[in-house]
Image: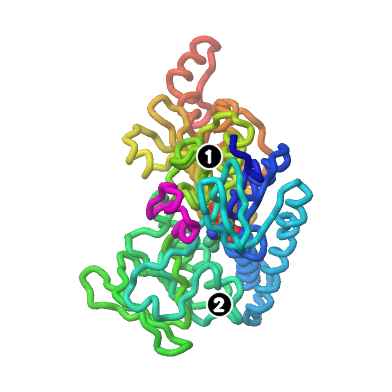
Amino acid sequence: MASYEFDIGILGGGAAGLTVAAGAARLGARTLLVEKEKELGGDCLHYGCVPSKTLIRTAQVYHLMKTSRQFGLPAIEVPTVDYGEVVKRIQSVIQTIQEHDSEERFCSLGARVVFGSPVFTDDHAIKMDGETYSAKRWVIATGSSPSAPPFEGLAEIPYLTNKDIFSLARLPESMIILGAGPIATEMAQAFCRLGTEVRVVQRSGQILSKEDKDMADSIMEVLRSEGVQFYLNSTVQHVKSNGNDEQEVVINQEDSAPVSLKAEKILVAMGRKPNIMDMGLERIDVAFDRKGLKVDERLRTNLKHIYGAGDVTGAYQFTHAAGYEGGIVVSNAVFHLPRKVNYTWLPWCTYTDPELASIGMNEKRAKETGIGYTVWTEAFKANDRSLAEGERAGKIKMLLDEKENPIGVQILGPHAGELLNEWVSVLNGKVKLSTLASAVHPYPTLGEINKKVVGSYFSPKIFSDRVKKGLKLFFQLKGRACE
Ligand SMILES: Cc1cc2nc3c(=O)[nH]c(=O)nc-3n(C[C@H](O)[C@H](O)[C@H](O)COP(=O)(O)OP(=O)(O)OC[C@H]3O[C@@H](n4cnc5c(N)ncnc54)[C@H](O)[C@@H]3O)c2cc1C
């Protein structure tokens, strides 16, 4: 039997790779972790979730300062933003989390960490900086990168991506954002709140195109009211640079002449491409396509001892999905307990203000699947805590199938991502809706909206004419006291 230096080798030290490395090493597997960059942590820590949420919070505080009158406070003249200070705060948050994702920590868990660009020499070995490392099993968890759309002129101009925006030397005066997905929408609001004039160009007629239109449109209205300008149903004709401080995007819109937009910076946020190149995958015949590594439900590639996890598979590109998939790989590759992925209750959240959080099916997905459903809603303007907080926008939508079982929930509102966690438990734990309806929630909390939407489903049943008639008959109730 062939012998290998390591039980498991992992390419990529981001959310997926780190989960596998920690799990495998702690279970006693001889583990190798290979990272291309100088530090562990991946996109989420350095260029994604962590810096974006830190920036969003800073922008939110600045926005609150500017809107102090709405809280019965004196109006204040706020100075302009020093983006250098904002970058310092972002870096300090990254550095704090970096300690948790450090080489030392993984070494203390028992994994060997090496830095460099690996290339497969055969399906059990990689070569890097003249050294060969062999492992019985491999995991490819190399993540994804911002994709550059083939717009005329884009390759010739200095455009920004998520790799640049959290370390800019100063706040741009104006910015055109190409794309209107979660990253684009979050950044549009954050930069606009900080003082940048923001315009968003979107090909379709809706922002956040995976979400239901009513929810996405509500977010767009909030952003519009704060000053973000949207160009929907617009395709980019070409892009050019008019010098360092002026970039130009010419867009085509239905039934109108081309429109020229000019701004200091262009941010491209039009999707992601998997990091699968230059690793020798072709040489060892691992199957992949434009979207990413092809994996089965146990996350095995066509070579059963090579697994794929995280963004590189092109499935659900979230940190928590990468972590979940990392756990599935540990189960299959180290424990030898066959486990398949199941994304039925995979939640996600777009961290605009208000946030939009989702689990299970929304109306769009239910329609695509052909499932019959009913929708139950409750508005935040009817939630006492929401009013006290000065938050009026948004609602919760609960979808039930034909058998009246929950198939999905979306929450648009303050702290929606946090509020969704109750549904994560309810849906994964198969908790009955009647249990949620009868559970006591503290008052006044935003979370009461979860109970209330379930109440809106039960109340026509409880307070029906039939029930009232029965009660009248059995207990001689006298009926209304006020007409
Ligand atoms: C702006 C932005 C905001 C985001 N916000 C959120 C959010 O709020 N919530 C959320 O859930 N998700 C968010 N995401 C998505 C999240 O960052 C990714 O889904 C997550 O990082 C995927 O983890 P991963 O391990 O697959 O990839 P990564 O975290 O990118 O890790 C891959 C690692 O592999 C390394 N690598 C690449 N090529 C090689 C190679 N050839 N050899 C060795 N190593 C290699 C990379 O350097 C990297 O360290 C956001 C993304 C962006 C861009």
**In this figure, which colouring scheme has been used for the structure?**
rainbow
Q: Pointer 1: what residue?
A: 305
Question: 116 or 384: nearer the eye?
Answer: 116
Is disc 2 placed on a helix, strand or loop?
A: loop
In the rendering, which numbered label is found on residue 103? Answer: none
Work out whether 183 lies above or below 237.
Answer: above
Name the amino acid, label 1: His
Q: At x 46% / y 24%, what residue is drawn?
A: 461
Q: At x 37% / y 67%, what residue is drawn?
A: 149
Q: Which residues are magenta?
A: 272-292
Q: Disc 2 or 1, which lies upstream in sequence? A: 2
Instruction: Find ligand 1 in the image and state its quadrant.
Output: bottom right
Q: Pointer 2: what residue?
A: 195
- Residue 40, given in percent of the width and then of the height, sits at 66, 59
- Residue 82, given in percent of the width and then of the height, sits at 65, 80
Quadrant in which the N terminus appears:
top right
Name the amino acid, label 2: Gly
Is 193 on the left-hand or right-hand side of 159?
A: right
